[in-house]
Image (spheres, rainbow, N blue to C red):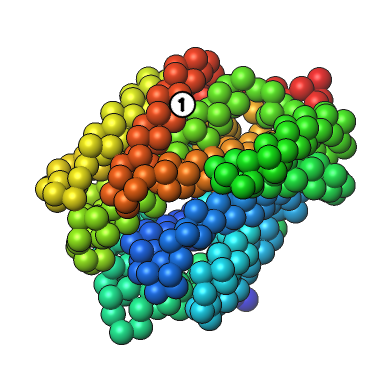
Amino acid sequence: MAQVKIVSIDPSMVAKRKVAFSVTAVFITQFVSFLFINARNIAQPQMIAELDGMVLFPWLIALPALAGSASTLLFGKLSDVYGRRAILLTSMIIFGVGLALTTQVKSMALLVTAATFMSIGHFPSVPLCFSVIGDLFSSAERAKWTGLLNLPTGIAATFGPVLGGVIAESAIGWRGLYWGALPLLLIAAGLVATAFPKNGAQAKPKVDIGGTAVMIIAATTLIFGFSWVGQPHRIGAGAALLVISIVAWWGFIAIEKKAEAPILDPQVLFNRTFITAAGASLLSFFGLLGIVAYSPIFVQEVMGVSPTVSGSMQTPFTMIVAFMGIPAGFLLARTGKYKWMFNVGYLIVTLTLFAMWRFTAVTPIWLFVLVTAVAGFGLGAIPTINTLVAQFAVPRRLLGVAVGAIFFFQMVGLAVAPSILGLAQNSATDLEGGLKLVFLVGAIAMVLSTALILTIPEVSIDVEVVDKAII
């Protein structure tokens, strides 16, 4: 009788294989997201010119950031409850529908509307990827892999800006960026659907509808309030909205303290390390936005450079920003110290923005590339450290909430900044003077964020935080 040889399967090998597939899916999702961002930033001046939309440009940034900030916080909470896979796939579906809608717009108002809808899905995808890395690895390994998550970001940054310029100048125009992103997004979604495990909380707590609604009111009135106080005929209405916003934020905090399943857990909201990093990050987006969104306009409209060359000029900055997260993650894993990297990063960005304030129409291209590249060394490490600090400062069960919350505060900064920067730009008599004021306001905001980050405590990355809710 023939003997049947039974081959045993090593459970550890199966687990490693699942982790490898999950990491691959995360990397490709991250790549698609940042490829689109880098390409679109360079194509935006062409979009604005075609649709005659410079007046509405601040809203093209602010309203998507508002919608994205709310969805990032909500999706982060939901991912802790229903699992990363289901929520990430939901965000990718919304992102894809938004891409398709944007290809059909014929006015700047419709572009703002489509971009706002798209951001509901697009913005949460990145923090959800970081949360997956936090799920897959221990605290000791988390820093290295979070740093390595910048690898696909760096690859996207390598040719994304040039790709954006080339497509914007081609026969298909800037809409080709949106059509091209769709099949890439479908591939990423297929990998997420097959690679990610079906995980989620055993008990499904109630969704914090009240807290979510009040938070949206608080953020909306904050953004419109800042925008309207800069318009002479709306100063009173703007001030009233800001008062409403303050009251709403106070109400939001009160609701979160008592909520059964708060969208922003008090253990996160009142954690000093977390809130210091979040506050500094919020302010830093004034500077980041000046470089990422306004400098391509300066290059193309003031310095008279083509979109393709503009993309090439931006490439060193985007590459350094993307790849700097890798050494930052490894350094943090090796030393366990992050405060010095925070301090150096914020200081570098502050100094470079003051340098950009002195740019003119005759500034040499090499000088623009050099200054923005140096800014990339400062900005590149900050997102990785922010994400890791958010994870290290709270219990593991709140990982999704914490990562979503750090991105939420960043998006609030991104939403508020255009109102302030737009006010500064419009106060000048010409485009060059207005954009220089944008860089100056960004530099001042970076001074404030640097002063704040100097006070951040240093928590241990090797010890899991005890969950106060269960002791």
Quarter holding the N terminus is bottom right
Q: Residue at x 35, y 35 (%)?
A: 440
Position in image of residue 9 (x %, y %) = 57, 57
Splitting the image into 4 quarters, where does residue 179 fall?
Answer: bottom left
Q: Which residue is under mark 1?
A: 449
Residue 334 x/y as whole percent: 38, 26
Looking at the rendering, in which quadrant would you find the C terminus? top right
Q: Quick one: SS at disc 1?
A: helix
Instruction: Please tell me how many numbered marks the rendered image carries.
Output: 1
| Residue nearest the viewer, comparing 119 with 113 | 113
CA neighbours of label 1 inside 10 A, class few (<14), some (14 to 19), many (20+)? many
Residue 338's place in the image compared with 398, above or below, is above
Q: Is residue 337 above or below residue 46?
A: above
Q: Is residue 16 above or below residue 468?
A: below
Residue 151 visible somewhere in the drawing: no
Q: Nearer the viewer, residue 343 or 466?
A: 343
The residue located at (72%, 38%) in the rendering is 240
Residue pictured at 64% horizontal, 54% vertical: 67
What residue is drawn where x is 66% and y is 64%? 90
Pinpoint residue 162: horizontal percent, then vertical percent: 26, 64
**Residue 442 point in image, percent of width and height:** 40, 36
Residue lying farthest front? Answer: 233
Kind of residue at badge 1: Ser
Q: Nearer the viewer, residue 91 or 443?
A: 443
Judged left or right of residue 259, residue 225 is left
Above or below 261: residue 162? below
